[in-house]
Image (tube, helix red, strand yellow):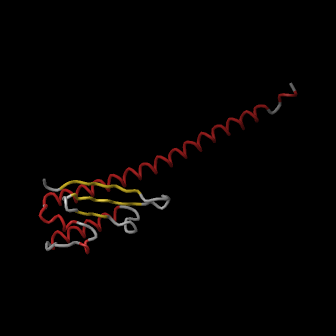
Amino acid sequence: MQNQRGIAVVEALIAMFIFSLGILALAGMQASLYARNQDARFRMLASVSANELVSVAIADAANAVCYTVPVNAQQNCDNKKAQDYTKSWVADVTGMLPAATDNPPQVSLNANKDFTIALFWQRPQDIQPHSYTLMTRLGS
């Protein structure tokens, strides 16, 4: 009986060690879920913003060139209201997405009337920026 003294303390220490590992794993999983939730949120914001601009460009297809970004590179745009809307949209996007001012939105319209929007964002812990691209053809 003398050999078994203190075995309860060893068992308690082993149980606490196993419990601590479980808690650490749970904390790591929670951090991973939080990061994935942020990624999904930013992707959703990018999607909604891109769809908003596409909807406006489709509704005002005659002035579609006025919705391209950068705004100062717009050619053949005489519609001040459309240009102001585009500037406001860019300000909203860069305000919603992290580091979007470092990776500004790109909106283009080619000769085939392909309207392409590319949005970028990067969280401080990300190595490379994330992106969301939406392309549609205006008109027929």
Write the residue at 25% across / 63% down.
108
Relative placement, left or right, of 105 versus 54 is right
Q: Give the answer, above or below, for where 21 lies relative to 113.
A: above
Q: Quadrant of residue 86?
A: bottom left
The percent position of residue 98, horizontal first and vertical second, equals: 40, 62
Image height check: is 43 above or below 15? below
Tell me if 111 is positioned left or right of 34 in this view.
left
Instruction: Give how far across and how far down residue 84 sits, in percent.
Output: 20, 71
Taking the spot 55% from the left edge, 46% from the top edge, the residue there is 28
Residue shown at the point (86%, 24%) measured from the top left: 1
Residue depicted at 83% across the width and 28% down the height? 4
Q: Quadrant of residue 19?
A: top right
Considering depth in this image, is 56 or 27 the residue closer to the camera? Answer: 56
Give percent across and percent down for residue 140. 13, 53
* Number of callouts: 0
* The furthest residue to the top: 1
Q: Nearer the viewer, residue 98 or 137?
A: 137
Q: In the image shown, does 20 or 126 lie closer to the viewer?
A: 126
User: Where in the figure is residue 14, as x and y percent of width and height?
Assistant: 71, 36
Q: Is residue 125 left or right of residue 134?
A: right
